[in-house]
Amino acid sequence: MKPESIETAAALFVEARAGDKHMQGLPMECVPETTGEGYLIQAAVAEQLSLKQVGWKLAATNVSGQRHIAVNAPIIGRLYADVVYDTPATILVRNNKMRVAEAEFTFKVGRDVPPVVNRTREQVMDFIDALFPAIELPDSRFVDFIAAGGASLAADNACAREFVLGEQVMGRWREIALDKYAVSVKVNGKPICSGTGADVLGDPREALTWMFNECGRLGITLERDHIITTGVIGVPVPIVPGDHIHADFGILGSVDVNLADLIEKVDGNE
């Protein structure tokens, strides 16, 4: 892509984010043809926003999610401080078009990670110093995100929107088989879905390893204290304003989100 096309596409995403709006699509000359071009636009958006980045997210880390948006691999996005909340959170969802909540395992990076490919899971976990339960409320800047394609969704920051972080897991969590670990979600007290860590590329630590190696391939240094959320456990849960979402991670904690319509987004915002 031409540099001016990348900057134009980035400006459109910045405008959509600022106005909490959705667009039909990018101009033809600004549509990325590859995921790599999409990441160039995503990086340009980050430069234009000049917001504090606090971490990363993974989208499409299970087969059903990949089929839903017609991709064959996960997609990486950035998490910014203005949309990361602590549990319990109250969040405005009026203009969120996806209207789903996703329970996720989230890790914190303990030290800077130089961009290297072919790291093993053991090597990756050596960089991790904490685990958290979390809920993501994703959304796309495209009206029809399903038809957008993987490259454009990479440009669209992997559909990152609000993110709610639970309390840090204490104790010997490294000894837990996260692939077999069960997580459930209730909406307004009613059980809606459950799943295990196996939904996330077979194990959330495998998703994390994929992320580290993909960032290595892209030349991205992962920073100390950044969080990385690894994708939905179970399935995305439909939500509407007024709902209360409770994600139960058992002995690893829980996360609560109240969904509002016409209030200020202040509770728990970092």
Image: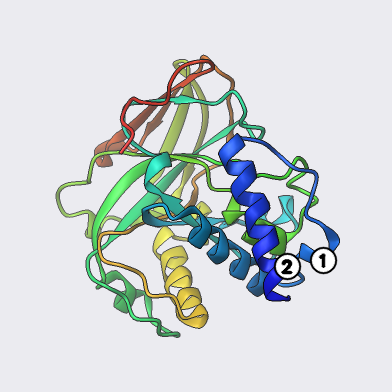
Q: Position of residue 160 (x, y in %)?
A: 53, 48
Percent of width and height locating residue 263: 46, 16
Q: Under tag 1, what secondary structure?
A: helix
Query: What amino acid type is highlighted by mark number 1?
Result: Glu
The reply to whether residue 30 is visible in this rendering is yes
Horizontal arrangement in the rendering, residue 122 relative to residue 231 (left or right): left
Q: Earlier in the sequence, mark 2 or mark 1?
A: 2
Q: Locate the N terminus by quadrant.
A: bottom right
Q: Name the residue at 44% across, 52% down.
A: 79
Q: Residue tagged by mark 2?
A: 5
Where residue 6 sits: x, y (%)? 67, 67
**203 left or right, relative to 114:** right
59 or 179, nearer to the observer = 59
Could you say which quadrant of the image residue 113 lies in?
Answer: bottom left
- Considering the image in quadrants, where does the C terminus appear? top left
Residue lying farthest to the front in this orientation: 4
Residue bearing mark 1: 29
Q: Amino acid at mark 2?
A: Ser
Judge left or right: residue 170 versus residue 185. left
Q: Residue visible at 73% across and 46% down?
A: 145
